[in-house]
Image (cartoon, grey):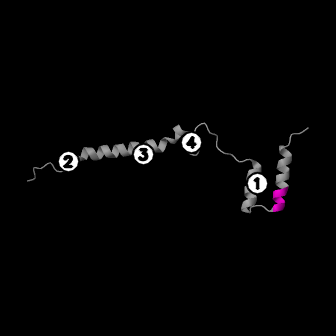
Amino acid sequence: MHWGFGFWPLFPLFWIGIIAFLCWGARRRFAWRERGGPFYASGERPFEPNALEILRRRYARGEIDATTFDQMSERLERSSRPRD
């Protein structure tokens, strides 16, 4: 017969460790709500490129040709000018 203590005193420590790990993971997972979002600090507006910047990026990637870029950029610049 075995009258020793064995590993039974370690089982509560094991479960405490599992619960602590789950609490840590849940806090880490849901803490982004407190920070104001995952991509920018609170109080700071996210970067939103304007239409001309998007057009320049599309031209740089080769999605549109030079003629289309010129036409669209001219149209955008005309629409952004104040009307008299």
User: What type is the residue that disc 4 sits on?
Assistant: Gly
The magenta segment: 66-70
User: What type is the residue that disc 2 sits on?
Assistant: Trp
Q: Quadrant of residue 64?
A: bottom right
Residue 19 placed where, x, y %?
Answer: 34, 43
Residue 57 placed where, x, y %?
Answer: 72, 56
Quarter the C terminus occupies: top right
User: What type is the residue that disc 1 sits on?
Assistant: Leu
Give the side of residue 50 with respect to residue 82, left or right: left
What residue is shown with label 3? 25
What residue is shown with label 1? 55
Give the side of residue 43 with respect to residue 81, left or right: left
**SS at mark 2?**
loop
- Neighbor class of circle 1 (other Cα within 10 Å; few <14, some 14-19, many 20+) is many
Q: Give the mark nearer the N terminus: 2 vs 3.
A: 2
Give the residue at x 25% y 44%: 12
**SS at mark 3?**
helix
Disc 3 from disc 4: Cα separation? 18 Å
Disc 1 from disc 2: Cα separation? 67 Å
Contact? badges 4 and 2 (CB < 8 Å):
no
Give the residue at x 37% y 46%: 21
What residue is shown with label 4? 37
Disc 4 from disc 2: Cα separation? 44 Å
Q: How many marks?
A: 4
User: What type is the residue that disc 3 sits on?
Assistant: Gly
